[in-house]
Amino acid sequence: MASDGHLHEVVVRCDRVSAPGQTYLLVATTAAAAASEREHDRLVDELSRANHRLSGTLKIVLDTIDSEDVSALFDNVLQEISETLEATGTLLYLADRDGYRLWGVSQGLQKVHAPRFLPYGGSAGKWVSQAGGTLMLRVMEPTVEELRRGHLSSRLVLDEGTRQTRRLPVSQLPPLTSMLVSPVWFSDHMIALINVGWDKTHQLRRDDARLLDAVGHYLSVQLAGALTTLRQQRGAELESAVAQVHLVLLNIVAQGSEDIPGEAERQIFSAVSSALSADVVPVRENPYQHETVVASLPHAGERALPMSIDQLEVSHPLDVSVVPIGVSDELGAWLGQMGEAAQGAFVDFGMFAGQRRCLLVLRPLEEEPLDDMELQFLQSLVEDVRDVTHGAEASAHDRYISQALQTGMRNELQQVDGITSQGVYSSATKAAFVGGDFYDLICLPEHRGCIIMGDVSGKGVEAASVSAAVKTALGAYSWEGLRPARMVRLLNEFLLGFSRLETFATLFVGIIDLESGKLTYCSAGHPPAIMVRAKTGDLAMLDVQSGVVGAFKDMDYRNGQAKVSPGDVLMLYTDGTTEARAADGSFFGEEGLRDALVEELPRGFSGLLDRLLTHLDDFTGRNLDDDVAMVALRFDEVGKSLSKE
């Protein structure tokens, strides 16, 4: 029986040896046939293992081709990495401002606690960055002395490649014993970490480390795109949260609630906690000692903060402010000593209803700090709350419109090479700068563009703020490479979040591919777009229609397609155009718009929309009942005519 516990066939020979006394030499050798069989089995196992690795790698590559859903793509990839390497599970961390944020978890690790955030300075990420490639790590068993001390704050980790060891905080280690930790590089920046691990000691192989390096190299472009998409999506989510709080606060003011400050405070606390996944702690000044600030802390209870509001805001002299809190700051260190989450922000909403309104937004140290977008979200929120709660509703309306114009709510047509564009917006209300009608042209990679036109129900601030949120969301979706119907379907779910206001919208969303000469569009309850053919002068209606957005949960949205050729003109408009009325009550209508197009296009594309607007003014006597928005796109270079860069 061998040391591995198995029986092996051996050949035995015994000879007498010339030596004092009765001495014999016993020699045992493995039978050649048995040795050959075992070697054969070993090679078959190695070949099977190599084939399994190769098959898994090919599956990862094939699954990433033409994938549109970034989140689902990487969920599948993490699972396939785990199965390929026969691991317990795989974690994916994406680089952020202050460290690596947990973004993906394979099925095998869904029910265990994994660190949500790894800071740049003291985690395995720094070790991997210095190595430049995949590390083979094993978490060592704690020593007897460490076990005697009880709670383990750190563990010794061995690099099996170099035999070097380092101590890492327990809070930054997943519940794994053996790990392959691989960097993903894009240009000279490490943009992600892939952590493949086993919950028991596992023999780590250099071939598996090289395989993981290759997978990371292949995924780098997709991950770089995912980072951009995530920031856009996060920005859209936070802007939507500000817009929803604004609408709710206006509703509270309009209803004349007897407890406007209390209602507003509850809505704000709920919105901040939900949007930032953080603890929200109310802070108030002691009415008898104005220098004393009291907070109702989750663990320590009612406590006086170690500093006044003025001391906290010494470098933020505005009437409202957001002050970041770090673990090394005086307030952060004090919170840590109190057993509280020690990072986040101090938020001052200023004075309203005769009282200073402040709060602490706190996150535990094992989670990521508030990033720049989240701090900007808080700043936008405090400014918006100030505007709504101070002064008359009309004044708040004007300030919100002004802020909206400064932060990008105005309609925009980006420059797309190969397309000449023009847009016009005319409000039925002289005092309004923005309303429910909107449009956008977004320049996308590879000679593509996304054209958006919509009309949100309602008027004024409500319609304008929802329009801004819709534009932001669609802009983020377009960069994900989604087809128009999919974009509109996601937007429908988004708008249903505004159910209290019963907001809905009509939309036209089109993806233009100049290389293939194809327009893919989704027209959701919107007036049909018109395509004017350059060669024949014919006008074609793009009539594949779907239902409105934001009205019902299970709506069916369909894609339509149209070919585009050099010189063709795409005309988009909102219903305020065709529903414009003359003094006798007659409508301008689609026929009136087509007739105006046929008359004006021969006079040139430049100034086309201004001339069409003149037709409307003449028809209505300069008395519009609804806002009017129009966009015209001329396709100058399509297919082979595209300029070679």
Image (cartoon, grey):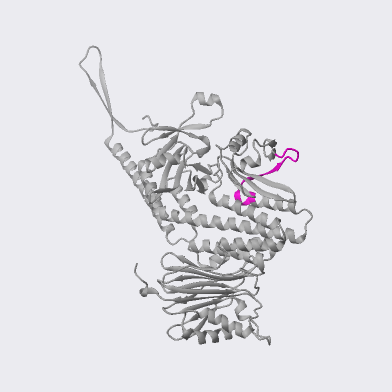
Can residue 73 be seen here? The reply is: no
- Give the x, y percent position of residue 412: 52, 68
In what quadrant of the picture does the C terminus appear?
Answer: bottom left
* Residue 574 found in image quarter: bottom right
Q: Is residue 63 above or below residue 456?
A: above
Q: Is residue 640 left or right of residue 602?
A: left
Comparing 585 with 366, the one in front is: 585
- Hey, which quadrant is residue 161 in on the image? top left
Q: Quadrant of the N terminus?
A: top left
Is 226 rendered above or below residue 572?
Answer: above
In this rendering, does residue 217 appear at all?
yes
Residue 288 counted in the magenta span: yes
Left or right of 202 in this view: 149: right
The answer to whether 289 appears left or right of 534 in the picture is right
The location of residue 381, given as percent across then percent down, is 63, 54
Of residues 271 and 409, the one nearer the viewer is 409
Q: Residue at x 29, y 39 (%)?
A: 36
Q: Position of residue 561 (x, y in %)?
A: 49, 75
Residue closer to the observer: 124 or 438: 438
Number of numbered discs visible in the structure rendering? 0
The residue under the point 31% across, 42% down is 40
Q: Give the residues in magenta.
A: 272-290
Above-or-below relation of 497 to 577: above
Of the pair 3 and 117, the residue shown nearer to us = 117
> For the point 37% across and 40% down, which residue is it?
131
Asked if the stretch drawn in magenta spans residue 81, the answer is no
- The residue positioned 51% from the left and 87% from the top of the image is 599
